[in-house]
Amino acid sequence: MKKINKYIIVALLTVAGLFQACETTDLDIKTSPNELDPTSGDPNLQLNAIQLAYVTSMNNLSDLGGELTRIQYMSGRIYFNNYGGGTLSGTWERTYSSGSSFGQNLGIWTNVDGLIALDATSDVDYSFHVAVGQTLKAHMLMLLVDYIGEAVYSEAGNPDEFPAPLMDDGASVYAEALALLDEAEAMFNAGPSTQGATDFFYDGDTTKWAKLVNTLRLKAYITTGNTAAFDAVIAEGDANFISSTEDDFQFQYGTRSLQPDTRHPDYGTDYTVSGAGAYRSNWLMQYMLNVDDPRIRYYFYRQSGATPGADADPDEETLACSLAIPPVHYQESEWAYCAVPEGYWGRSHGNNEGTPPDGFQRTAVGVYPAAGKFDDDDFAVPEDDDNYDPVVNLGAGGGGAGIEPIILASYVDFWRADNAMAKGSSDAIIEGFFRDGLQKSIEKVQAFGSLDPSADLSFAPTETEITDWIDGIIADFSAASGDEKMDIFADQYFVTMYGGSSEAYNFYRKTGYPTNLAPNWEPDPGAFPRTFLYPQSEVITNPNLTQKTDMAQQVFWDTNPASPAFPPAN
């Protein structure tokens, strides 16, 4: 019955469009927080709706954070044009909305309110449902502040008194989110029963949920630079936060392709009868190639062994820019304007060329985290060959049964290194956390190789090679100073966050590192977005909210100089 319920809810959210990687504005959805009546539906279905609305928003925020930091490819040269008012409408609606599908409310806030009301009046203890909902709600509120600068809190959920709720300032929303975590922790510590609910993350393990609560506190403190509060959480011991890979906070996808499609969204885009549908980031692939990163064959699956304009003849039809002369600002850069060699066929930041017939040449998402194929040099045969058999076909590799990385133990190790640097700790302490983060990341990524039954894992790096590589990165970090030192750390943090990059955007605005990111295709792309525009779906229904005219507003914790002077790489 649990599996049946899981598929039902995935179907509901698929119909609602929640697995779409791109956000659109749906003017028919009642956007929060104008109409937020607590629901009286099935509490288990409400909890499922909360979880899946949350993970879909995390997928969207990860994509946005990855695009702005070059972890993922960003199309479009001008920042302001790329990220209009609809960019975060879906995330906003899923956080607050009373919109529904098949009678099931979809908004996190709406369903949490309903669960709280039900728990208060029912003889059944639904505190597990409430605690999970409050935890995910708290995280999403912090992220809304991170990405928009503000969020609605004090006037949310009360449409009779506040039909057009005002935004609360970011610092106060963060404080309220931390208070929600306090409430959730108390409920988890009591060890409540799941009452038959499906927990998509920790299978009802309240101890692991309590660790997540503390880890979300760490997220808040590392973002705001509160080193004392960060240290206080750490002082409680490694058993109280996500310090082990087995406690990683992630969402598990499936292999089903139809009714409903449960596969990782990136797999669904790239493993099709038409070939790969998305582009990988040239900066990330070139950086990983340059440093011989042992995760590269897991992250990317190449369909070609060479790239036009790099180590193959230019090809106007499939890679038009391979014939172009790079502009001056790229000629002065160390990064590829168009083509990365060895078949790492992607696109550079801001490339807005049309879509050529390169679906069976461009690099596809690999076995991590989307459960595609492991790259073992099994390049596709040229299309004009009679025996041509595209490799990125339906069901190839791991079939899409990958994960949505949200907060991993490796990320926390990087936070600990970052916190140690902020306090001026010794190099040995900083390097220890840095090393732990790399080790955990590589071990986790390598474990995904087994998902591809056709993979020739003899191409995988050996344990000795990985140890030597990590030693080399740490040695380079130890020998470096200033920007070079921070660039090494930040580059590796960004590589580690591939697939789950929501915090990369925060780190980049907080520190300005790495400074060695590839430039935009456009010499003058406009100021780097310090926050996104207000969700247009809320603007058009809330007379108290006027759309921003730019993306220059800085989050309360972003105390750096205004753009365009900061971040320096932009």
Image (cartoon, helix red, strand yellow):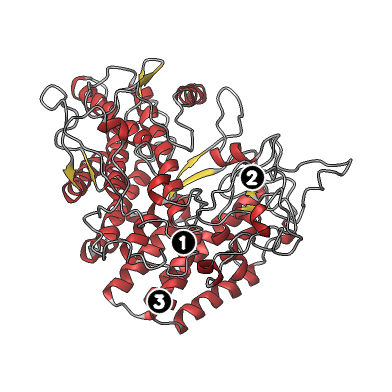
Which residue corresponds to the image point at 52% horizontal and 75% vertical from the top-left? 473
Q: Is residue 410 visible?
A: yes
Question: Is residue 400 rendered to the left or right of residue 229?
Answer: right
Q: CA distance from mark 1 to mark 3?
A: 23 Å
The answer to which of 62 and 244 lies nearer the viewer is 62
Q: CA distance from mark 2 to mark 1?
A: 35 Å
User: Looking at the image, is mark 1 or mark 3 nearer the viewer?
Assistant: 1
Q: Which image quadrant for residue 528?
A: bottom left
- The residue under label 1 is 523
Q: Is the C-beta separation of discs 2 and 1 under 8 Å?
A: no
- The residue under label 3 is 483
- The residue under label 2 is 372
Residue at the farthest right position = 386
Q: Position of residue 92 (x, y in %)?
A: 32, 35
Q: Mark 3 belongs to which amino acid?
A: Asp
Image: 487 above or below 259: below
User: Looking at the image, is mark 3 or mark 2 nearer the viewer?
Assistant: 3
Q: CA distance from mark 3 to mark 2?
A: 36 Å
The answer to which of 72 and 235 lies nearer the viewer is 72
**Mark found first going from the N terminus, 2 or 1:** 2
The answer to which of 407 and 90 lies nearer the viewer is 90
Q: Is residue 129 visible?
A: no
Q: Which image quadrant for residue 544?
A: top left
Q: Is the C-beta separation of discs 1 and 3 under 8 Å?
A: no
Question: Is residue 166 rendered to the left or right of residue 491?
Answer: left
Residue at the farthest top position = 103
Q: Mark 2 belongs to which amino acid?
A: Gly
SS for dot 2? loop
The answer to which of 64 and 196 lies nearer the viewer is 64
Give neighbour class at mark 2: few <14, some 14-19, many 20+ (Cα, 10 Å). Answer: many
